[in-house]
Amino acid sequence: MLERIEAAPKDAILGLGEAFKADPRSEKINLSVGVYQDEHGKTPLLECVKEAERRLAANPTTKSYLPISGLPEYCKATAELAFGAGNEPLVSKRVAWAQTPGGTGALRVSADFIAANLPNSTVWMSEPTWPNHPQIFNAAGIATKTYPYFDAPNNSLNLAGMLAAIEKMAAGDVILLHGCCHNPTGIDPTAAEWKQIADAVFARGVMPLLDFAYQGFGDGLEEDAVGLKAFSRPGAELMVCSSYSKNFGLYRERVGALFVVTSTAAAAASVQTQIDKVIRSNYSNPPAHGGEVVATILRDPELRKQWEGEVTTMRNRINDMRHALVEALAAQGVPGDYSFMTRQRGMFSFSGLTKEQVEALRSEYAIYIVGSGRINVAGLTPANIERVAQCIGEVVGQ
Ligand code: LMR
């Protein structure tokens, strides 16, 4: 019976990585999947991670199962990283949590939790959003809809459109927001705009769900939590899906976390049992290694300081590349004002290139970017940036 099954389309992002690997052209450049690269085009293993792994290897304990919701010290340390130590929901014990296999795992657990416990909720996502968002929620049987987010002509946030859409959402629906470094646009609300959005969401009785995958890659570890903090109000409910793929460079270890903030400590205790239930029937309990590395770093003052320095280095390099790309495009005489790229935050720049131009970049110049025109700025290096700007100039001029 399996011969009737048709091939699924390639993944919009990871599928490009496969095509890139198979491309024999030596001049190829990969600016598609959101993976950080250093100035030599390598994805580094952070020094703090190496040291944490050394310490863990020197003191092996056990390979027995973790609890369903993961390492308690990992959950506590990562919750404090996201919310800030001493934040009211943590002090009031209003947070249910789980260590998850990556941010995607956290999203899928949240989706299964919503499907089981809030079955009539629609999950609203920004237009555009990360292509995996609708797939994850649809796979869990949840209805999804979109709200306006991007003001294309001005390369800015369409706040008015977003607020108007929130007013039309049904009470009990869920709004999925990007905690910082919006993927793919790179456009985030300001602190004042976050407050307006949070006011509108709570006034409507909608549940906020923040995908928080790039903490530290925008303006700083604390600065990037400004949106989360706008939602973290006394008695308010909130869900957060964190990823440590990017800011710890632990991509393949699959390290993430889900935090569900409830209105009371008693509700958090019940919600915890429901989270555990959906995890048990999915992957039973999370893999340990990446979580142990993150917990070791966050709980050791020296390693933590080193990590913060390494995150700063990655963030500064990305922001330097934004400026360098705008300058390189100008130097190549590419028509148009690309200065908006310097105002975008995180790994990505929404370039405004059309599907046809993206396709021409790939087929004619072996430069891979995502079909939406999203460029992974973290893949630009001093060695490839001039060629990228030149080839963008070629396809824009065609
Ligand atoms: C991306 O958007 O490129 C990253 O989040 C990697 C992924 O899993 O898609």
Image: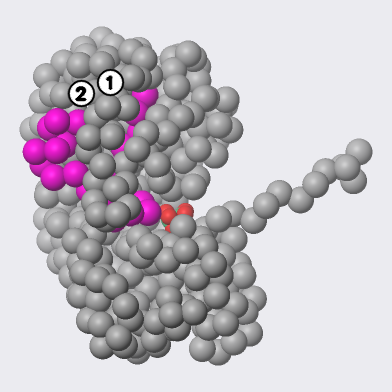
Magenta span contains residue 137: no
Relative depth, front residue between 39 and 172: 172
Q: Which mark is residue 200?
A: 2
Location of residue 193 in the rendering, given as x and y in whole percent from the top left corner: 14, 38
Picture mark count: 2
- Indicate which quadrant contains ligand 1: bottom left
Quadrant the N terminus occupies = top right
At label 1, the amino acid type is: Glu
Q: Residue at x 26, y 42 (%)?
A: 158
Mark 2 surroundings: few (<14), some (14-19) or many (≥20) residues within 10 A? some
Do labels 1 and 2 touch, CB within 8 Å? Answer: yes
At label 2, the amino acid type is: Ala
Image quarter of residue 75: top left
Element class at badge 1? helix
Mark 1 → mark 2, Cα distance in angstroms: 7 Å
Q: Which mark is residue 167?
A: 1
Q: Residue at x 41, y 46 (%)?
A: 128
User: What segment is highlighted magenta in the picture?
Assistant: 174-197
Relative depth, front residue between 158 and 74: 158
Image quarter of residue 45: bottom left
Q: Is residue 383 above or below residue 155?
A: below
Mark sitting earlier along the chain (1/2): 1
Location of residue 290 in the rendering, given as x and y in whole percent from the top left corner: 39, 52
Element class at badge 2? helix
